[in-house]
Image: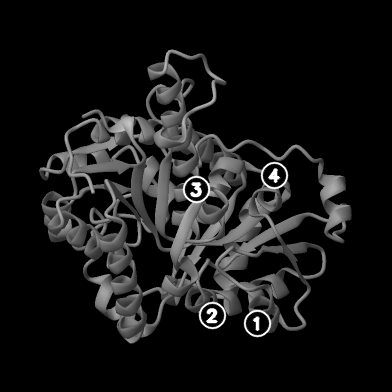
């Protein structure tokens, strides 16, 4: 029986800020895809009222964005936001409780398909349990096994029906290792510059529009922020009062938590990262999705990152990638400077930042390199479909195959 003839139930699991943003995009794209299919099957035109039985239902792990997109949140992403090997170990009892809560809900609702997004420490276990129950699994935003612990690719081969990857080099890496992978483009690849002008944004956020701005992005998880923010703030102090410093509040963090860490530092907390980046002269940005956001806004930046000494000791020897910064990996060369662990000092941050704050060949080369990265991230047929729409097409095709129903 064709799967669009009845309500389709999907478990979707995303464990942190970037993942749940991608999850919200995907939910919206799937709703549009199923609505259009129902309209066409009913013989109607776009805009026809679609019967309730043709709807698609989502539940799982995520945050406010996925909730707003219509997902019934069983496990809140904030409760899964840990970072590093040693940090995950200390949170294992809590993570396992949440994991079992999600699996119990899946047993109750019996989904037709499971979609897991990033967060491999949690989500490969979700994938394994779903496959044990005869439920097909899509991994969207795959684990970065090409960077470390490459042997774990076997988990994808065993538990995942389809891998939807967001970086161009990942498709070949996973396919060469027996994983059914498709590059759909990066979910942030079509980000556009903000519509409001800089003066209006300055007025709304009590910023001095006459000064150059620097955006500070220490990460989206509390432990991550505690490790990265002190040196970032010290770097800002070294730059001095000639700049305005903006710190976007990630959805997984509480404003009061950031305020307690900032103290008396002259930093402005703002609600949205994209205009902050777009209007800033440069950024100090922790490794992760924020580096891709900066690339999409064309904002030069210095990439920084620090983890606990134990996490670094355990993990460094396993890292196989030639770069830490995602934009450098995508480009296959160093576009932005990387200051990691012992190299991440305020003196080095300021020295590298000053190279890109002023007009000159270093800044120009970085801006050109970020433009190259934007092109690479848009993926195939970039003018036709958003990456989330391409992902929705792949998922819709998987749902057409015969599957178990409740």
Q: Residue at coordinates 27% horizontally, 54% vertically from top-left?
A: 110
- Mark 1 and mark 4: span between their CA atoms? 32 Å
Residue 377, relative to residue 313: is it above or below? above
- Closer to the camera in the image, 25 or 152: 25
The residue indicated by pointer 1 is 261
Q: Earlier in the sequence, mark 3 or mark 2?
A: 3
Labels 1 & 2 near each other (Cβ < 8 A): yes
- Closer to the camera in the image, 192 or 264: 192
Residue 377, visible in the rendered structure: no
Q: Earlier in the sequence, mark 2 or mark 4?
A: 2
Q: Quadrant of the N terminus?
A: top left
The residue indicated by pointer 2 is 226
Say which of marks 1 and 4 sits in front.
Answer: 1
- Mark 4 and mark 3: span between their CA atoms? 38 Å
Residue 165 quadrant: top left
Dot 2: element: helix
- Mark 3 and mark 2: span between their CA atoms? 27 Å
- Mark 2 and mark 4: span between their CA atoms? 33 Å
């Amino acid at each position: 029986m064709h799967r669009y003839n009845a309500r389709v139930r999907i478990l979707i699991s995303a464990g942190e800020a970037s993942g749940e943003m991608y999850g919200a995009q995907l939910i919206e794209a799937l709703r549009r895809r199923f609505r259009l299919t129902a309209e066409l099957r009913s013989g109607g035109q776009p805009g026809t009222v679609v019967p309730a039985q043709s709807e698609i239902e989502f539940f799982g792990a995520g945050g406010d964005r996925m909730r707003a997109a219509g997902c019934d949140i069983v496990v809140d992403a904030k409760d899964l936001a840990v970072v590093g090997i040693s940090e995950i170990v200390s949170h294992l009892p809590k993570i396992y409780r949440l994991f079992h809560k999600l699996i119990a809900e899946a047993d109750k609702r019996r989904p037709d398909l499971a979609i897991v997004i990033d967060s491999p420490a949690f989500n490969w276990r979700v994938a394994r349990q779903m496959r044990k129950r005869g439920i097909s699994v899509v991994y969207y935003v795959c684990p970065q096994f090409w960077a470390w612990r490459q042997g774990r690719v076997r988990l994808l081969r065993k538990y995942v029906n389809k891998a939807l990857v967001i970086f161009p080099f990942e498709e070949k890496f996973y396919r060469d290792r027996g994983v059914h992978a498709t590059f759909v483009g990066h979910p942030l690849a079509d980000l556009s510059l903000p519509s409001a002008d800089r003066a209006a944004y300055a007025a709304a956020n009590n910023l001095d529009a006459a000064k150059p701005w620097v955006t500070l992005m220490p990460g989206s998880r509390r432990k991550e922020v505690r490790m990265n923010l002190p040196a970032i703030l010290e770097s800002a102090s070294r730059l001095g009062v000639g700049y305005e410093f903006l710190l976007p509040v990630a959805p997984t963090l509480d404003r009061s938590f950031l305020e307690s860490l900032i103290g008396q530092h002259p930093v402005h907390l703002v609600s949205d990262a994209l205009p902050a980046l777009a209007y800033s002269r440069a950024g100090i940005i922790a490794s992760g999705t924020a580096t891709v956001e900066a690339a999409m806004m064309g904002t030069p930046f210095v990439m920084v990152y620090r983890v606990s000494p134990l996490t670094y000791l355990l993990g460094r020897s396993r890292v196989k990638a030639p770069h830490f910064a995602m934009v450098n990996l995508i480009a296959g060369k160093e576009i932005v400077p990387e200051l990691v662990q012992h190299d991440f000092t305020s003196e080095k941050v300021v020295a590298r930042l000053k190279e890109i704050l002023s007009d000159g060949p270093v800044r120009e080369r970085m801006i050109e390199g970020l433009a190259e990265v934007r092109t690479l991230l848009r993926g195939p047929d970039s003018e036709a479909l958003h990456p989330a729409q391409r992902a929705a097409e792949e998922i819709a095709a998987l749902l057409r195959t015969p599957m178990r129903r409740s």
